[in-house]
Image (cartoon, rainbow, N blue to C red):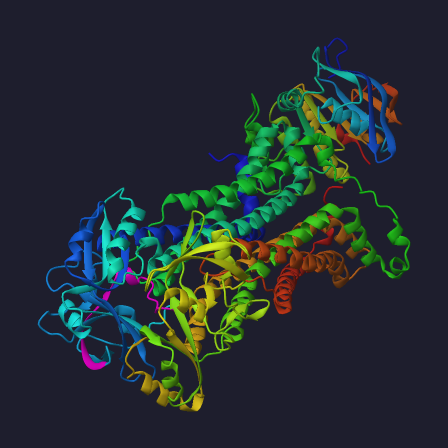
């Protein structure tokens, strides 16, 4: 049998359903976000681990120019190596029918016989290549999808300067290309970059690598010393043009994937924590006020002999019910969003399967935090209520003492009419309560600003990186280093307005025990197409001696301007030397290191060479230039700046911006939840007073003004307060979000504050309109008849 | 049912109560001595602010005095123990308020159960409601009952636990005389049939006629005590 007290609870929850729902939604928002983030991480980690395990993703990777096949035995004999898989990895330029731009492809060899020892392909359609048919290829699934390629289709390709027709026999996914990114690219561009797998022998024949390999991947025994193995492998490959082995952590696709998971972790710690904290604060505030309105009933229950504990438990149950509704909604929503979010990731991170099996941890953590916050809020209020002797609790609170303060003697106060004076006096009389109500609204505005800041930040990032920092239309990377005079040949291509060379060298940069594998980019003096660009100071001239390091790299190495770092080039003569840090600059993307191109060529001992060229292109001749580029030998990659900008926004649009959309929606829930509850509670606190005024002859509009005017003023106070807190949150978030991949600049446009303020005002108006309807139905007689 | 020989149920000595309202001190009770005998019906009469409600609240354990003691059946009330006062209210005292104080979300029966569920030896809610003549309205919500009916539910709620003390603060204050008489009859019936010591506050001097004893209040003191030679039935009253 349900006790009478429980029955009271149920009926009262039903009576307050709108408020209950509003609070539950506030709790649900925080819960859903936390669950989304936690389960997304869980799913990404589980999926990654299972995928790597099933496909035997390698632990160590290395490239060389050309190593003899028999070296593979020595490699396999390195202690700790379980499996060694040698292969050929080359680049090619493809001409896909119906696609104007040249497509960059990475070609990987498949074993002639038997399955892949490591990095096994997952065939998605068709089959593997037939060793007897040299022109067959398996293409990566995302690339196939981007160009609608199916088994049976063909396209032409330039391999080592020779044009060939390749036949697609299958599509596949590989653990090495979960995040398929072109060399030098930043975001996956499945139209302009593809991965192709070919039989070993035909590929060896095409690139003159018979009985040789230029890439090796290793599977290690558990507990093997990766550093030692890399050192030994480097030693074996050095004579054959090895450019430094690296572990799984530095493998491009995995590095991006791990960064993304780290980013998600960051996100799950920061954004939902802020959000949940705000939701907890609001729940606390709203529930505390709700219980204050129950003060009379608490006194009555005490008069009957109910103990403080019983009364406390009664209200705790009320909070538990509201909290549980919130958590249930939040859990369902969070699980759905988590699944959806994880699926979103699989658009960029290509897995053949997705493990979304959220464990209880995320739900328990989110639920416990939300309920705890709500209970804490009610506890304080119940404690205040039961502390009063029942006789006093049952009386209406004695009329608050108002005083004429200095403010009421000013000229402005004289100009106020009585209703406005009531509003102002109430705020002055209870400044803490007014401040807390304002703070609640301000918090929802702040969260909104924090969410919207992403859009500003991404815009600023793209604008700085791609528009202010770079001016080339296209960048061509060569297979090998080419003499600098090659640049002259390209100047005469159709539509080319200007050409600027650059040099890239793989290197390890060290300071003390800190080592970073970081390529060094050589920039010619007076570079203008792709200069070193500081986000604040603009273009930087690279001094002839010394390195120019990005701030993040300098931080990773614990160096600053004037320090000396060790540089070990991983190609050519493998030079080792010490170089001064000439300057540190700020960039939003990556951790680049620059030096003067001639100086780089001098230390590497390669003579006057370039790795590639930046082009400025006349838009009218673009088509004929593209056609020409497709046939040029030696080209490993072509990157178009506009395409990079487009894919950047596309990727961001499909990840961050959607994410921001959620936050905006949740922030609005917060503001509606807070505002609606504030007004409803104010109404229940003041119903008598307002009814009395109605009886005295005030119109509905006038009493609405008295009730809603206060909320209006508090909203106006909340806007600048929210803007300030929002700036603080955005600052905190951007500094906490810093990764090696990118830094989010702290940029807040005026329009962002404006949008947040407008959304908050709209929420207030909607809530005010809802409560206004209740004011119209205020029962004057009943209100006046109830207890004094 | 006056009985000079009956034992003293409740006694108060030297009760004072000072409320502090901002900078002002209000002396609600200025040293009150009073004895209630078992089964007695006492009416407290006096203008507002004379200290009647304050005395009743302190005697019922709803409030604590600034000075003085209250002794219930030979045991002093421990005024500084929240728990002891709570048990005293729960086990011995029934309250009836001027404005009924029913829980609007509960029916008549449920409002009574609210108290019987925590009482030691209660009567059933229906029985309590029958005593006040509402046996046929048990499933009505307060909003579906008239003022007099609501007050009678409040009385049923107060007596359902078979209290030793029934304290009524202006039970007829919000009612017209006809309804008021019904309510007084219910109170009198309980006083007679259950032998419950009853104290009743009123503004209305006419109502004092139903009491064994009338205490006149002014300015925080009992200024006069009158023993009624004859108790009149509520039905005979008119105001």
Indicate whether A302 appears above or below B71: below
Does residue A149 appear anywhere in the picture?
Answer: yes
Q: Is residue A166 magenta?
A: yes
Quick check: A87 left or right of A754? Answer: left
The outermost residue toward the left is A132
Q: Which residue occupies the foreground of this view, A152 or A195?
A: A195
Q: Residue at x 85, y 32 (%)?
A: B49
Indicate whether A521 appears above or below B237: below
Q: Residue at x 55, y 33 (%)?
A: A313
Q: Position of residue A76 (x, y in %)?
A: 18, 51
Q: The N terminus of chain B is located in which quarter?
A: top right
Q: Residue at x 38, y 44 (%)?
A: A360
Boundaries of the magenta span: A162-186
Q: Which residue occupies the foreground of this view, A282 or B122?
A: A282
Quarter of the figure with residue A304: top right
Quick check: A10 left or right of A418? Answer: left
Q: The C terminus of chain B is located in which quarter?
A: top right
Q: Which residue occupies the foreground of this view, A204 or A525?
A: A525
Q: Is residue A720 magenta?
A: no
Quarter of the figure with residue A603: bottom left
Q: Position of residue A399 (x, y in %)?
A: 80, 42
Q: Position of residue A315 (x, y in %)?
A: 57, 38
Does residue A29 appear anywhere in the picture?
Answer: no
Quick check: A396 left or right of A559? Answer: right
Q: Across the whole image, how many numbered discs are drawn on residues?
A: 0
Indicate whether A219 appears above or below A126: above
Quick check: A209 left or right of A637? Answer: left
Quarter of the figure with residue A590: bottom left
Q: Position of residue A429 (x, y in %)?
A: 79, 47
Q: Which residue occupies the foreground of this view, A10 or A628?
A: A628
């Amino acid at each position: 049998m349900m006790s009478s007290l429980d029955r009271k609870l149920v009926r009262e929850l039903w009576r307050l359903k709108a408020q209950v729902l509003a609070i539950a939604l506030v709790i649900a928002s925080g819960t859903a976000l936390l669950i989304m983030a936690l389960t997304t991480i869980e799913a990404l980690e589980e999926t990654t681990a299972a995928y790597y395990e099933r496909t035997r993703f390698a632990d160590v990777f290395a490239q060389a120019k050309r190593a003899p096949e028999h070296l593979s035995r020595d490699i396999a004999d390195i202690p700790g190596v379980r499996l060694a898989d040698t292969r050929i990895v080359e680049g090619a330029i493809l001409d896909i029918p119906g696609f104007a731009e040249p497509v960059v492809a990475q070609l990987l060899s498949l074993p002639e016989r038997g399955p892949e020892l490591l990095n096994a392909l997952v065939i998605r359609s068709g089959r593997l290549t037939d060793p007897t048919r040299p022109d067959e290829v398996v293409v990566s699934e995302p690339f196939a999808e981007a160009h609608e390629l199916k088994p049976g289709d063909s396209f032409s390709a330039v391999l080592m300067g020779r044009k060939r027709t390749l036949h697609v026999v299958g599509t596949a996914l590989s653990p090495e290309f979960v995040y398929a990114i072109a060399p030098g690219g930043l975001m996956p561009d499945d139209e302009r970059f593809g991965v192709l797998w070919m039989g070993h022998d035909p590929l060896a024949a095409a690139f003159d690598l018979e009985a040789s390999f230029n890439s090796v991947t290793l599977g290690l025994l558990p507990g093997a010393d990766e550093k030692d193995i890399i050192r030994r492998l480097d030693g074996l490959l050095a004579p054959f043009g090895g450019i430094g082995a690296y572990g799984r952590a530095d493998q491009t696709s995995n590095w991006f994937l791990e960064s993304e998971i780290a980013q998600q972790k960051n996100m799950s710690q920061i954004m939902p924590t802020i959000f949940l904290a705000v939701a907890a604060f609001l729940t606390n505030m709203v529930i505390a006020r709700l219980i204050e309105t129950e003060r009379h009933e608490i006194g009555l229950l005490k008069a009957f002999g109910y103990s403080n504990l019983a009364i406390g438990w009664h209200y705790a149950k009320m909070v538990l019910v509201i909290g549980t509704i919130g958590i249930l909604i939040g859990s369902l929503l969070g699980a759905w969003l988590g699944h959806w979010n994880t699926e979103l990731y699989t658009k960029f991170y290509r897995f053949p399967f997705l493990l979304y099996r959220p464990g209880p941890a995320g739900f328990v953590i989110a639920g416990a935090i939300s309920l705890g916050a709500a209970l804490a809020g009610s506890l304080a209020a119940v404690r205040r209520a039961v502390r009063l002797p029942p006789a006093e609790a049952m009386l209406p609170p004695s009329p608050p003492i108002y005083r004429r303060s200095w403010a009421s003697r000013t000229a402005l106060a004289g100009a106020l009419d009585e209703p406005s004076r009531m509003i102002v006096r109430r705020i002055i009389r209870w400044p803490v309560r007014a401040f807390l109500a304002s703070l609640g609204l301000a918090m929802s505005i702040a969260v909104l600003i924090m969410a919207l800041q992403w859009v500003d930040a991404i815009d600023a990032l793209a604008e700085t990186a791609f528009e202010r920092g770079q001016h080339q239309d296209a960048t061509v990377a060569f297979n090998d280093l080419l003499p600098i005079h090659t640049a002259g040949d390209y100047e005469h291509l159709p539509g080319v307005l200007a050409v600027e060379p650059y040099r890239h060298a793989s290197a390890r940069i060290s300071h003390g025990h800190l080592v970073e594998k970081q390529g060094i980019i050589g920039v010619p003096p007076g570079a203008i197409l792709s200069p070193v660009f500081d986000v604040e100071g603009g273009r930087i001239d690279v001094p002839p001696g010394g390195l120019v390091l990005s701030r993040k790299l300098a931080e990773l190495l614990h160096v600053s301007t004037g320090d000396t770092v060790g540089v070990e080039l991983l190609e050519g003569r493998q030079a080792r030397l010490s170089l001064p840090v000439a300057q540190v600059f700020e960039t939003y993307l990556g951790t680049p290191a620059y030096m003067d191109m001639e100086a780089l060529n001098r230390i590497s001992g390669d003579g006057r060479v370039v790795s590639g060229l930046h082009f400025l292109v006349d838009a009218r001749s673009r088509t004929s230039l593209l056609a020409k580029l497709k046939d040029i030998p030696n080209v490993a990659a072509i990157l178009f700046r506009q395409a990079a900008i487009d894919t950047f926004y596309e990727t961001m649009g499909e990840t961050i911006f959607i994410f921001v959309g959620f936050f905006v929606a949740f922030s609005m829930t917060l503001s509606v939840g807070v505002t609606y509850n504030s007004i409803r509670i104010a109404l229940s606190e003041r119903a008598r007073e307002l009814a009395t005024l109605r009886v005295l002859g005030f119109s509905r509009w006038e009493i609405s003004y008295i009730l809603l005017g206060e909320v209006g003023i508090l909203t106006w106070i909340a806007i600048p307060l929210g803007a300030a807190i929002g700036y603080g949150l955005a600052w905190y978030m951007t500094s906490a979000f810093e990764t090696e991949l990118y830094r989010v600049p702290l940029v807040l446009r005026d329009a962002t504050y404006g949008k947040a303020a407008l959304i908050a005002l709209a929420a207030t108006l909607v809530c005010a309109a809802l409560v206004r309807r209740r004011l119209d139905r205020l029962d004057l007689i009943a209100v006046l008849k109830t207890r004094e | 049912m006056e009985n000079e020989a009956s034992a003293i149920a409740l006694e108060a000595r030297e009760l004072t109560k000072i409320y502090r309202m901002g900078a002002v001190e209000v002396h609600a009770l200025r040293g009150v001595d009073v004895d209630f005998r078992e089964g007695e019906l006492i009416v407290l009469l006096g203008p507002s602010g004379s200290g009647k409600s304050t005395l009743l609240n302190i005697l019922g354990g709803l409030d604590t005095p600034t000075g003085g003691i209250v002794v219930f059946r030979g045991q002093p009330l421990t005024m500084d123990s929240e728990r002891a006062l709570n048990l005293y209210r729960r086990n011995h005292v029934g309250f009836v308020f001027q404005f009924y104080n029913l829980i609007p979300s509960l029916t008549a029966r449920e409002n009574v159960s609210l108290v019987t569920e925590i009482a030691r030896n209660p009567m059933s809610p229906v029985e309590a409601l029958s005593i006040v003549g509402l046996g046929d309205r048990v499933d009505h919500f307060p909003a579906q009952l008239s003022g007099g009916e609501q007050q009678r539910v409040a009385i049923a709620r107060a007596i359902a636990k078979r209290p030793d003390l029934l304290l009524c603060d202006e039970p007829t204050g919000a009612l017209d005389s006809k309804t008021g008489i019904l309510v007084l009859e219910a109170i009198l019936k309980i006083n007679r049939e259950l032998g419950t010591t009853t104290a009743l506050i009123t503004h209305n001097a006419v109502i004092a006629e139903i009491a064994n004893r009338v205490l006149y209040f002014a300015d925080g003191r009992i200024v006069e005590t009158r023993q009624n030679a004859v108790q009149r039935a509520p039905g005979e009253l008119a105001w």
